Each structure stands twice: as C-alpha cells, then as structure tokens.
Image (cartoon, coloured by chain):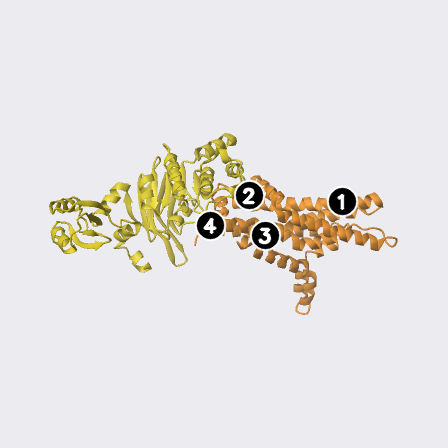
Chain colours: A yellow, B orange
Amino acid sequence: MIEVRNLTRRYGQFVAVDDISFQARPGEIVGFLGPNGAGKTTTMRVLTGYIPPTSGTVRIAGVDVMEDSLEARRHTGYLPETVPLYPDMTVREMVNFVADLRGVASRRARVDEALAQVGMTERAGSLIRSLSKGMRQRVGLAQALVHSPPILILDEPTIGLDPHQVIEVRDLVRGLGAADRTVLFSTHILSEAEQVCDRVLIIAGGRIVAEGAPDALRDSLQRGGRVYLRLANAPELKQVRRVLGDVAGVAGVESESGGFVVQMVKGMDARAAVAGEAVRAGWRVLEMRPWGATLEDIFLEFTASSRTIKRRR
Amino acid sequence: MWVVFKREMRQYFTSPIAYLVAFAVLFLTGITFTSDLRARSGLAPADGSVIQGFFAFVMIFLAPLLTMRLLAEETREGTIELLLTLPVQDGAVVFGKFLGAWAYYTLLLLATLVYPILLIALGNPDIGAMIAGTIGLWLYGGSILSVGLLFSALTENQIVAGFLSMAALFLLWLADSIGILFAGISVEAAEFVRTLSLRGHLSTSFLLGIFRPEDAVFYIGLTAVMLLITIQIVGARRWRT
C-alpha cells in the first residue's frame, strides 16, 4: 500500500512535484505515465526515501518515509532509472550483496528464486559488465525483488531497450503483480502503460492530470480526438467535407498523407457515424484509426487548463 | 557495515590501482631501505625508522589513490541511489568503506614489516621503536584515509577527489612549517596550525619509539571528525529544502 498525500517537492525555485495525492493498493499495478521531466522520478525518489519531500506525507505499508525511513525502505524494492549495478561483480554477487545489506533470511534460496523469476539463473556467474542492457535491467529487477517486498517501485524499466527486450520486461513486470504486492511503474509510453497496468496516473508538470483504468482513459481521449480515414476511390477534400461536415460531432476535415483527418468536437465520439456516412456516400474505407493519439496529445488534452504547462512553454 | 566492508576489500584485490599502489610502496621503500643500509654500513647502526618515515610520506600521495574511488564512483554510476534506499544507515555505508580502505592500508603496512624483520635478522635494532612506529603509522593511515574519503564524498569526479585529498594532506603534512609563517601574526595561531601537522605527531614521537597519548588522540580524533563530516555530506541529500 502506497499512500501519498499532498506531496510537493521543490528544487530551489523549480517545483518538480506539485501537491500530488494518490494511493496504490495491494495487488495493483499502477502506471505512472508522463513525459520526461514531469516529476515521475522525483516522486519515486521521495517514495524510496532517497530525497525528502518539501511538504506532504508519504506512507509505505503504513510507515511514514520521513519518520521511519529505514522501516519504510525495508518494505520497498526499488529499481532506479539508471540501473544501479557494479560492473565488476557477477550477477549472483550483486544480488547477494543487496540481499546481505537487506539482511534477507535464507539468502541462498531467495537469491536463487529472484534470479529464476527474472530468468537470469543461467547467467548468474557472468560479470555484469559483460551483460546487455536488457539483462542488466533484469538483474536490477532481481535486486529489487530479492527480499520479496510488498511494494515494488520501478522507474522506467523499459527505457533504452530494444523492442524484444521491452516485451520481455513488460511481461516480467506484469508477472510481478502478485496477490498482495503493490507495483508502481513509470513510463512515458502510453501503450506500455495500457498493456501492463491496472490503473494509470498521468502526471504532467508535477501534477496528476488524469487517473483511471487504461481503456477508460483511452476512450475519454478518443472523444474530442482525431481520426485518420483512408478511402479507396479517393474523393476530393471538398466532397468529403460536404459529406462528413454535417455529421453530428465532427468539427472539421483536413487532408493528410493520402487520407483525411477528421477532427471531433470535444467530448463527443462520432467515429461510428463517420464510418457510416462514408460508406453511404459510396466510398470504400481502407483504414480508420485514431490519429496522433500520442502522449503529447493526451497531455495537451488533459492539461489545457493547467497553468503549469503554459508557464513552461 | 561488514557487507560494505567486504565488498570494498574484494574491490581492492580486483582493482589495478590497488596493485599499483602496493607495487609503488614496496618498490620505493625497497630502494630507500637498500640505499639507507649502504649509506650507514660501517658508520651507524641500521635504523628502521627511515623506512617508516618514508612510508608515511609516500602515503600522502598514494592513500588518495585508494580512497578517491570510494564514494565518487558510487555517485557517478548512480549506485549511491541503491545504497541510500536500502535499509542501511548512511553511517554504516561510510564506515564500511572506510574500514575497507584501512584494512587494505594495514596490509600494505604489514608488507613493509619485511624491512624490520630483515634488520632483526641481521643486527640488533631497537625493536620497541619499530613497534611504536608501526602502531603510529597505522593510526596515521586511518586519518589520511578518512581525509581522502571526505573528498570522495564531495565530488563525483575521482580525479578531483584524489587531487584535492593529496593537496589537503600535503598541506596538513607541512602544517608545522606553515605554522611558522603565522608566527609573526600571532603565536597562538602558529601554535594551533603547528598542532595540525600530520608529520609532527609522527616524526617526533612514534617513530622514535615514544608513545604520547596526545598523538594517538590526534590521529583518532582527526579520523572521527572526517568520518562524521563525510556521513553528513552523504546524508545531506536527505535534508529538507
């Protein structure tokens, strides 16, 4: 259980995290989604006791991280963004080292188990310096798991990996969300958060700007979003405008890379009507998909009213 | 703390710098020992304190090579974030690293005992002075390593840490001579600076076989103060701003 209440962290004049509150319950994988510099790493560092909050409280498994930092750290496994490994140690030595510092009971069994969990048993004797980035990421995970913590905090575990490794790590993380474990997982990739997490917190400019289950967030995004439409017997833009412009919920049509981008009115989802009208007009629809529903768009969408963002632009 | 200590010890045995330092120490003391023996032959009795005084002096430059890595590298590699988010006190991390460095230094010091042993085998030197000198050098080592560790905590650049600790140690080594410069201004200031001298507490006591409590207290106290400051520097990132 992670409970964050009114957490603010400043670096001098710069407000990195601005009065955020959230909870993550046991058994939940919570995604922390935001662009670089949104305050994800800062929040995680406060949660793990690496830096103090400027104000607000953080409770990890019921323990306040400022009042009893050591006890809170005991309940937490943490994988920082720059994977903290000693290149001159072997995989097993590294995990042993952390297990020893944590005072893990029956160390041998636990280290073996953690290595098996991340699929590194066969490379246990390899020097960390000789490992690929994806493998290092797994050793970092094993290190965070070795004391079977109830709370797991992972800072961008897929950054800098190749697509194959990204999938492996995502699968791993999904598998880590055990019955009573809370996982907080940060990323700046929307689809990743969708695949891995039960719930997503979107953070921008140090504030939580949206929160919810990934599909619910996506739906709310599609409303007022844009849709890309490609038609086989390509009609003129004028024609398309005439036909689709009358559909309720359509704000406008532009031509775009061989097709058309249909802008929806904010808060309305006219996808079904657009498809229907296109077919009725005798056009064959080759392709229809959300257009540019990138993270940037989400932030623009969700933070349109946020002063923080405007000030930084 | 012992976990950190063990890691640092292992580190010394796999690091080329540590072996180079050991090589330099034994090579240089070996040369000094031989030339000193030759110079004295037939004139004066062999004296183990020449080697000990020389050992103390080269350590001003070699000890920073042993300590510069300790915290600077952790900061640069980001592994400090791991250490400081584990349920371990900052003090245990700093102390463990210090003990690792000191243990390696102790091994170097023990290796130089080969010269006194040779002297004992060959002649009839003052064994008491040799023992006192070794104890003195051991305490002295703790204090210079703690100074090095402090500078390693201040920067993430190993070279800067090493260079600054060499400079600081050299100034402290010469503090008795520097103190004289202050004599014109104030006798008390001169006296104070002189007391900070690293060599002053060694060359006029331990190395002559004299054990003065204040010298031991000076080295232990210097070590303690340096370690406390280092712990504060490491913990500073946890201060509320």
* Mark with earlier residue (1, 3): 3
Foreground: disc 4 or disc 3: 3
Residue B232 is left or right of residue A80, and the answer is: right
Secondary structure under the numbered disc 3 in the rendered image: helix
| A170 displayed left or right of B189 | left
Q: Residue at x 28, y 42 (%)?
A: A214
| Quarter of image, res B57 | bottom right
Asked if disc 1 and disc 3 are in contact, CB closer than 8 Å, the reply is: no
Residue of label 1: B114
In front: mark 2 or mark 3? 2
Percent x, y of residue B18:
64, 47
Q: Chain of mark 2?
A: A
The residue closer to the viewer here, A289 or B165, is: A289
Residue wearing tag 4: B238
Is residue A25 visible in the rendered image? The answer is: yes
Residue B206 shows in this picture: no
Identified at 38% across, 57% down, the residue is A14
Crowd tier of the residue under label 2, counting other residues whose Cα lies within 10 Å: few below 14, some 14–19, many 20 or above: some
Three-letter amino acid code of the residue under disc 4? Arg
Amino acid type for the residue under numbered disc 1: Val
Q: Position of residue A302 (x, y in %)?
A: 26, 51
Instruction: Give the quarter of the image for residue A237.
Output: bottom left
Residue at image coords 82%, 52%: B37
Chain holding disc 4: B
Which residue is identified by label 2?
A88
> Mark 1 and mark 3: span between their CA atoms?
28 Å
Q: Residue furthest right?
A: B42
Q: How far is mark 2 from mark 4, CA to CA?
A: 28 Å
Residue type pointed to by label 3: Met
Q: Which residue is mark 3?
A: B68
